[in-house]
Amino acid sequence: MTLYLFLVQMDLKRPVTVRGGQKMGAEAFYLPGGVINTLHISSNNTVRQVINALLKKFTVADNPAKYALYKRYRREEQVYVCKLSDGEQPLFLRLVAGPNTDTLSFVLREQQTGEWDAFSIPELRNFLRILDKEEEEQREAVIRRYEAYRQGLQEALTELRGPS
């Protein structure tokens, strides 16, 4: 089996959880956008295998189901991005497209399906905490706005009544 060098651009918007050493445990951080990583894979490797290999290479502890591999290609000055299915063989597509990466390249992104089962319970709880905080901030803003409006109305009524 021949292994080929395969380039994948990392385009992740959310933090990833990375396994540290025994003393460090796991740590979450943002990967810089646009970083291009390389893998040695065969033309028989599937999208799911490529995603798993990328996550393993960078010791990412997150569920691989949270990620998808997209092909990016250019036609007549227009750039298109299309999600690959788990069973497709990206290196085979790369070999068929030829060496020019403008013709075809690959990007690792978070799933866009909205499926919540790809997230762990602690991640879901964190989402809920963030949403609760945002809801509380919005509620307080509405209360402040209407309190200021009520105070303005009371001042206007007092002014109309004149001195007592």
Image (cartoon, helix red, strand yellow):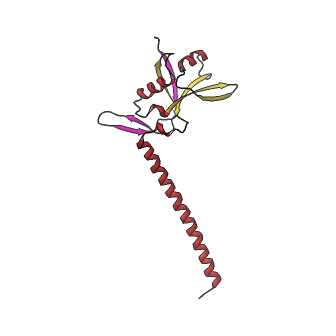
Q: Left or right? Give the position of 57 relative to 161.
A: left
Which quadrant is home to the C terminus? bottom right
Q: Residue at x 57, y 18 (%)?
A: 93
Q: Left or right? Give the position of 97 relative to 42.
A: right
Taking the magenta stretch, the answer to whether it contains residue 77 is no
State whether residue 143 is above or below residue 163.
above
Q: Percent x, y for residue 123? A: 43, 42
Q: Residue at x 45, y 44 (%)?
A: 124
Taking the magenta stretch, the answer to whether it contains residue 24 is yes
How many numbered circles are shown? 0
Q: Which residues are magenta?
A: 1-30
Q: Percent x, y for residue 150? A: 58, 72
State whether residue 35 is above or below residue 124.
above
Residue at the right extreme, as displayed: 76
Q: Percent x, y for residue 6? A: 50, 20
Foreground: 80 or 127? Answer: 127
User: Quadrant of the rendered structure where residue 159 is?
Assistant: bottom right
Residue at the left extreme, as displayed: 23
Residue at the top extreme, as displayed: 1
Residue at the bottom extreme, as displayed: 164
Q: Percent x, y for residue 138? A: 53, 58
User: Quadrant of the rendered structure where residue 162 is?
Assistant: bottom right
Q: Residue at x 41, y 39 (%)?
A: 28
State whether residue 150 is above or below residue 86.
below
